[in-house]
């Protein structure tokens, strides 16, 4: 018996993904929940906050640095002992005695200092580092937006994967009901001697295939709901899904293109790399800084020395082979970032073209599948009527039923692909998937 093997509607399921829903979970709610509760996106948001903190650190490089120091010392080292007495403002003529200078008594001291340092010019490194930090923080935020949209696409796949499995189960139940009715009819005819026992056995074998198919689809439903729950950051989805699996209304909008997070991130990363190259070049330029300070050193609470200082200094590394190599490396990284930006733009245009072609192909398959299902149902009706009149063998009826199941499989597969390909096109074009905004 040549019964077609397209009974396994489960093959069109993409191992999908669940959520604990009450009162019907809509697709929009599922996407929003994934954005809120999924651990992977939470980690991505933590990276955004980390980049923002780094940007604040680079921005604050232009601020002054205030340092406090406290110390206590006891020494008989000649130079330190003399310097300590001098800082304590208690040098006398006896301290110039050669014996005292060469072999001083141990001396103790305690005190502290406060120092304020303000960079005045650093070869452009501070400004470049600040801009690079800001660009990287914005790039991470854009990348997080892209990750959210990719997650939304995964939710679309998983959500409709569950609905495909459940629709497949409904059709399996229909087939089981149909088989039972046909078994009753054939069984009665066998008892009347109008049909062979082999016909009834063939029909029971077909019924067993339907039962096996039903068990497989049930497993796929549970797996799909569990997978959806994984995407949404919880256990398997319980309860109905409220957004029906149907063909989207209206044609694909022409040229509707938004802002893709990955392209925005690539552009910002290229700008950050350029600023990094400027900062690296700044290492070969002079630095100018201001320093203000005050200090005190005590011999006792009342016997002490105080002093202050102020100065402007310049430091210039005229030649440094490591700094030169770092500047060359930073420039190469900037060029690489520009090339990567160009590649991502080209890749995005390719993805848009492929996604549009996929939508058109899925739409054509869905239209053809609708016609095929109508024809298969009519063929089954005619075969069954002829069989009941004794004008066609049972094998023709079973083949017609297999054709109906194949058409149903094609309907589900093409409809699923149509919804997913539309969402993939929205991802490629940078528009909100299924119209859901963060």
Image: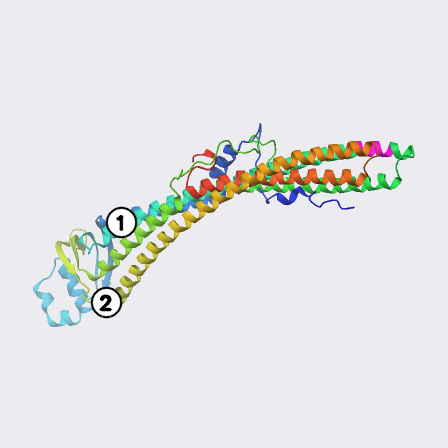
Residue 280 sits in quarter? bottom left
Tell me where residue 304 appears, x and y as whole percent. 15, 54
Left/right of residue 28 with respect to residue 116 in the rendered view: right
Q: Residue furthest top?
A: 23
| Viewer-proximal residue among 326 and 430 | 430
What's drawn in magenta, residue-wise? 181-187
Tell me where residue 122 appears, x and y as whole percent. 20, 55
Identify the colour scheme used: rainbow
**Classed neighbour count for the residue bearing mark 1: other residues with Cα under 10 Å, few (<14), some (14–19), many (≥20):** many
Tell me where residue 256 appears, x and y as whole percent. 40, 37
Q: Which mark is residue 130?
A: 1
Residue 184 lies within the magenta run: yes
Left/right of residue 264 with respect to residue 183 in the rendered view: left
Secondary structure mostly taken by the magenta-highlighted segment of the chain: helix
Q: Residue furthest front?
A: 391
* Residue 213 vertical placement versus 79 (above, below): above
Residue pictured at 37% horizontal, 47% vertical: 263
């Amino acid at each position: 018996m040549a019964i077609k093997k397209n009974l396994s509607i489960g093959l069109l399921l993409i191992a999908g993904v669940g959520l604990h829903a009450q009162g019907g979970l809509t697709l929009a709610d599922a996407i929003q929940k994934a954005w809120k509760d999924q651990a992977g996106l939470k980690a991505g948001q933590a990276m955004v906050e980390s980049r923002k903190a780094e940007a604040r650190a680079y921005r604050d490089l232009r601020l002054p640095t205030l340092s406090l120091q406290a110390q206590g010392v006891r020494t008989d080292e000649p130079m330190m002992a003399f310097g300590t007495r001098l800082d304590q403002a208690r040098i006398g003529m006896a301290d110039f005695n050669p014996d005292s200078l060469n072999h001083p008594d141990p001396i103790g001291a305690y005190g502290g200092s406060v120092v304020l340092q303000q960079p005045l010019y650093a070869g452009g490194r501070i400004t470049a580092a600040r801009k690079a930090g800001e660009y990287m923080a914005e790039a991470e935020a854009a990348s997080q937006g892209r990750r959210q949209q990719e997650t939304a696409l995964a939710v679309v796949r998983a959500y409709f994967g569950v609905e495909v499995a459940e629709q497949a189960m409904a059709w399996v139940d229909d087939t089981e009901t149909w088989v039972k009715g046909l078994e009753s009819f054939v069984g009665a005819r066998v008892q009347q001697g109008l049909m062979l026992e082999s016909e009834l056995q063939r029909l029971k074998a077909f019924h067993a295939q339907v039962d096996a198919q039903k068990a497989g689809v049930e497993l796929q439903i549970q797996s799909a709901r569990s997978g959806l729950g994984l995407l949404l950051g919880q256990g398997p989805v319980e309860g109905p899904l409220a957004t029906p699996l149907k063909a989207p209304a209206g044609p694909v909008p022409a040229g509707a293109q938004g802002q893709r997070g990955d392209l925005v991130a690539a552009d910002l990363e290229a700008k950050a790399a350029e600023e990094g190259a400027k900062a690296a070049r700044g290492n070969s330029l002079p630095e100018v800084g201001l320093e203000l300070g005050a200090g005190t050193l005590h011999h006792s609470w009342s016997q002490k020395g105080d002093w202050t200082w102020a100065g402007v200094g310049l430091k210039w590394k005229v030649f440094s082979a490591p700094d030169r190599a770092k500047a060359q490396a930073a420039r190469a990284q900037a060029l690489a970032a520009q090339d990567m930006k160009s590649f991502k733009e080209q890749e995005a245009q390719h993805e848009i073209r492929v996604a549009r072609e996929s939508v058109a192909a899925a739409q054509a398959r869905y239209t053809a599948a609708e016609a095929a299902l109508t024809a298969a149902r009519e063929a089954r009706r005619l075969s069954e009527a002829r069989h009941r009149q004794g004008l066609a063998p049972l094998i023709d009826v079973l083949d017609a039923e297999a054709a109906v199941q194949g058409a149903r499989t094609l309907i589900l597969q093409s409809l699923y692909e149509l919804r997913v390909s539309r969402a993939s096109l929205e991802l490629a074009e940078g528009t909100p998937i299924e119209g859901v905004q963060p």
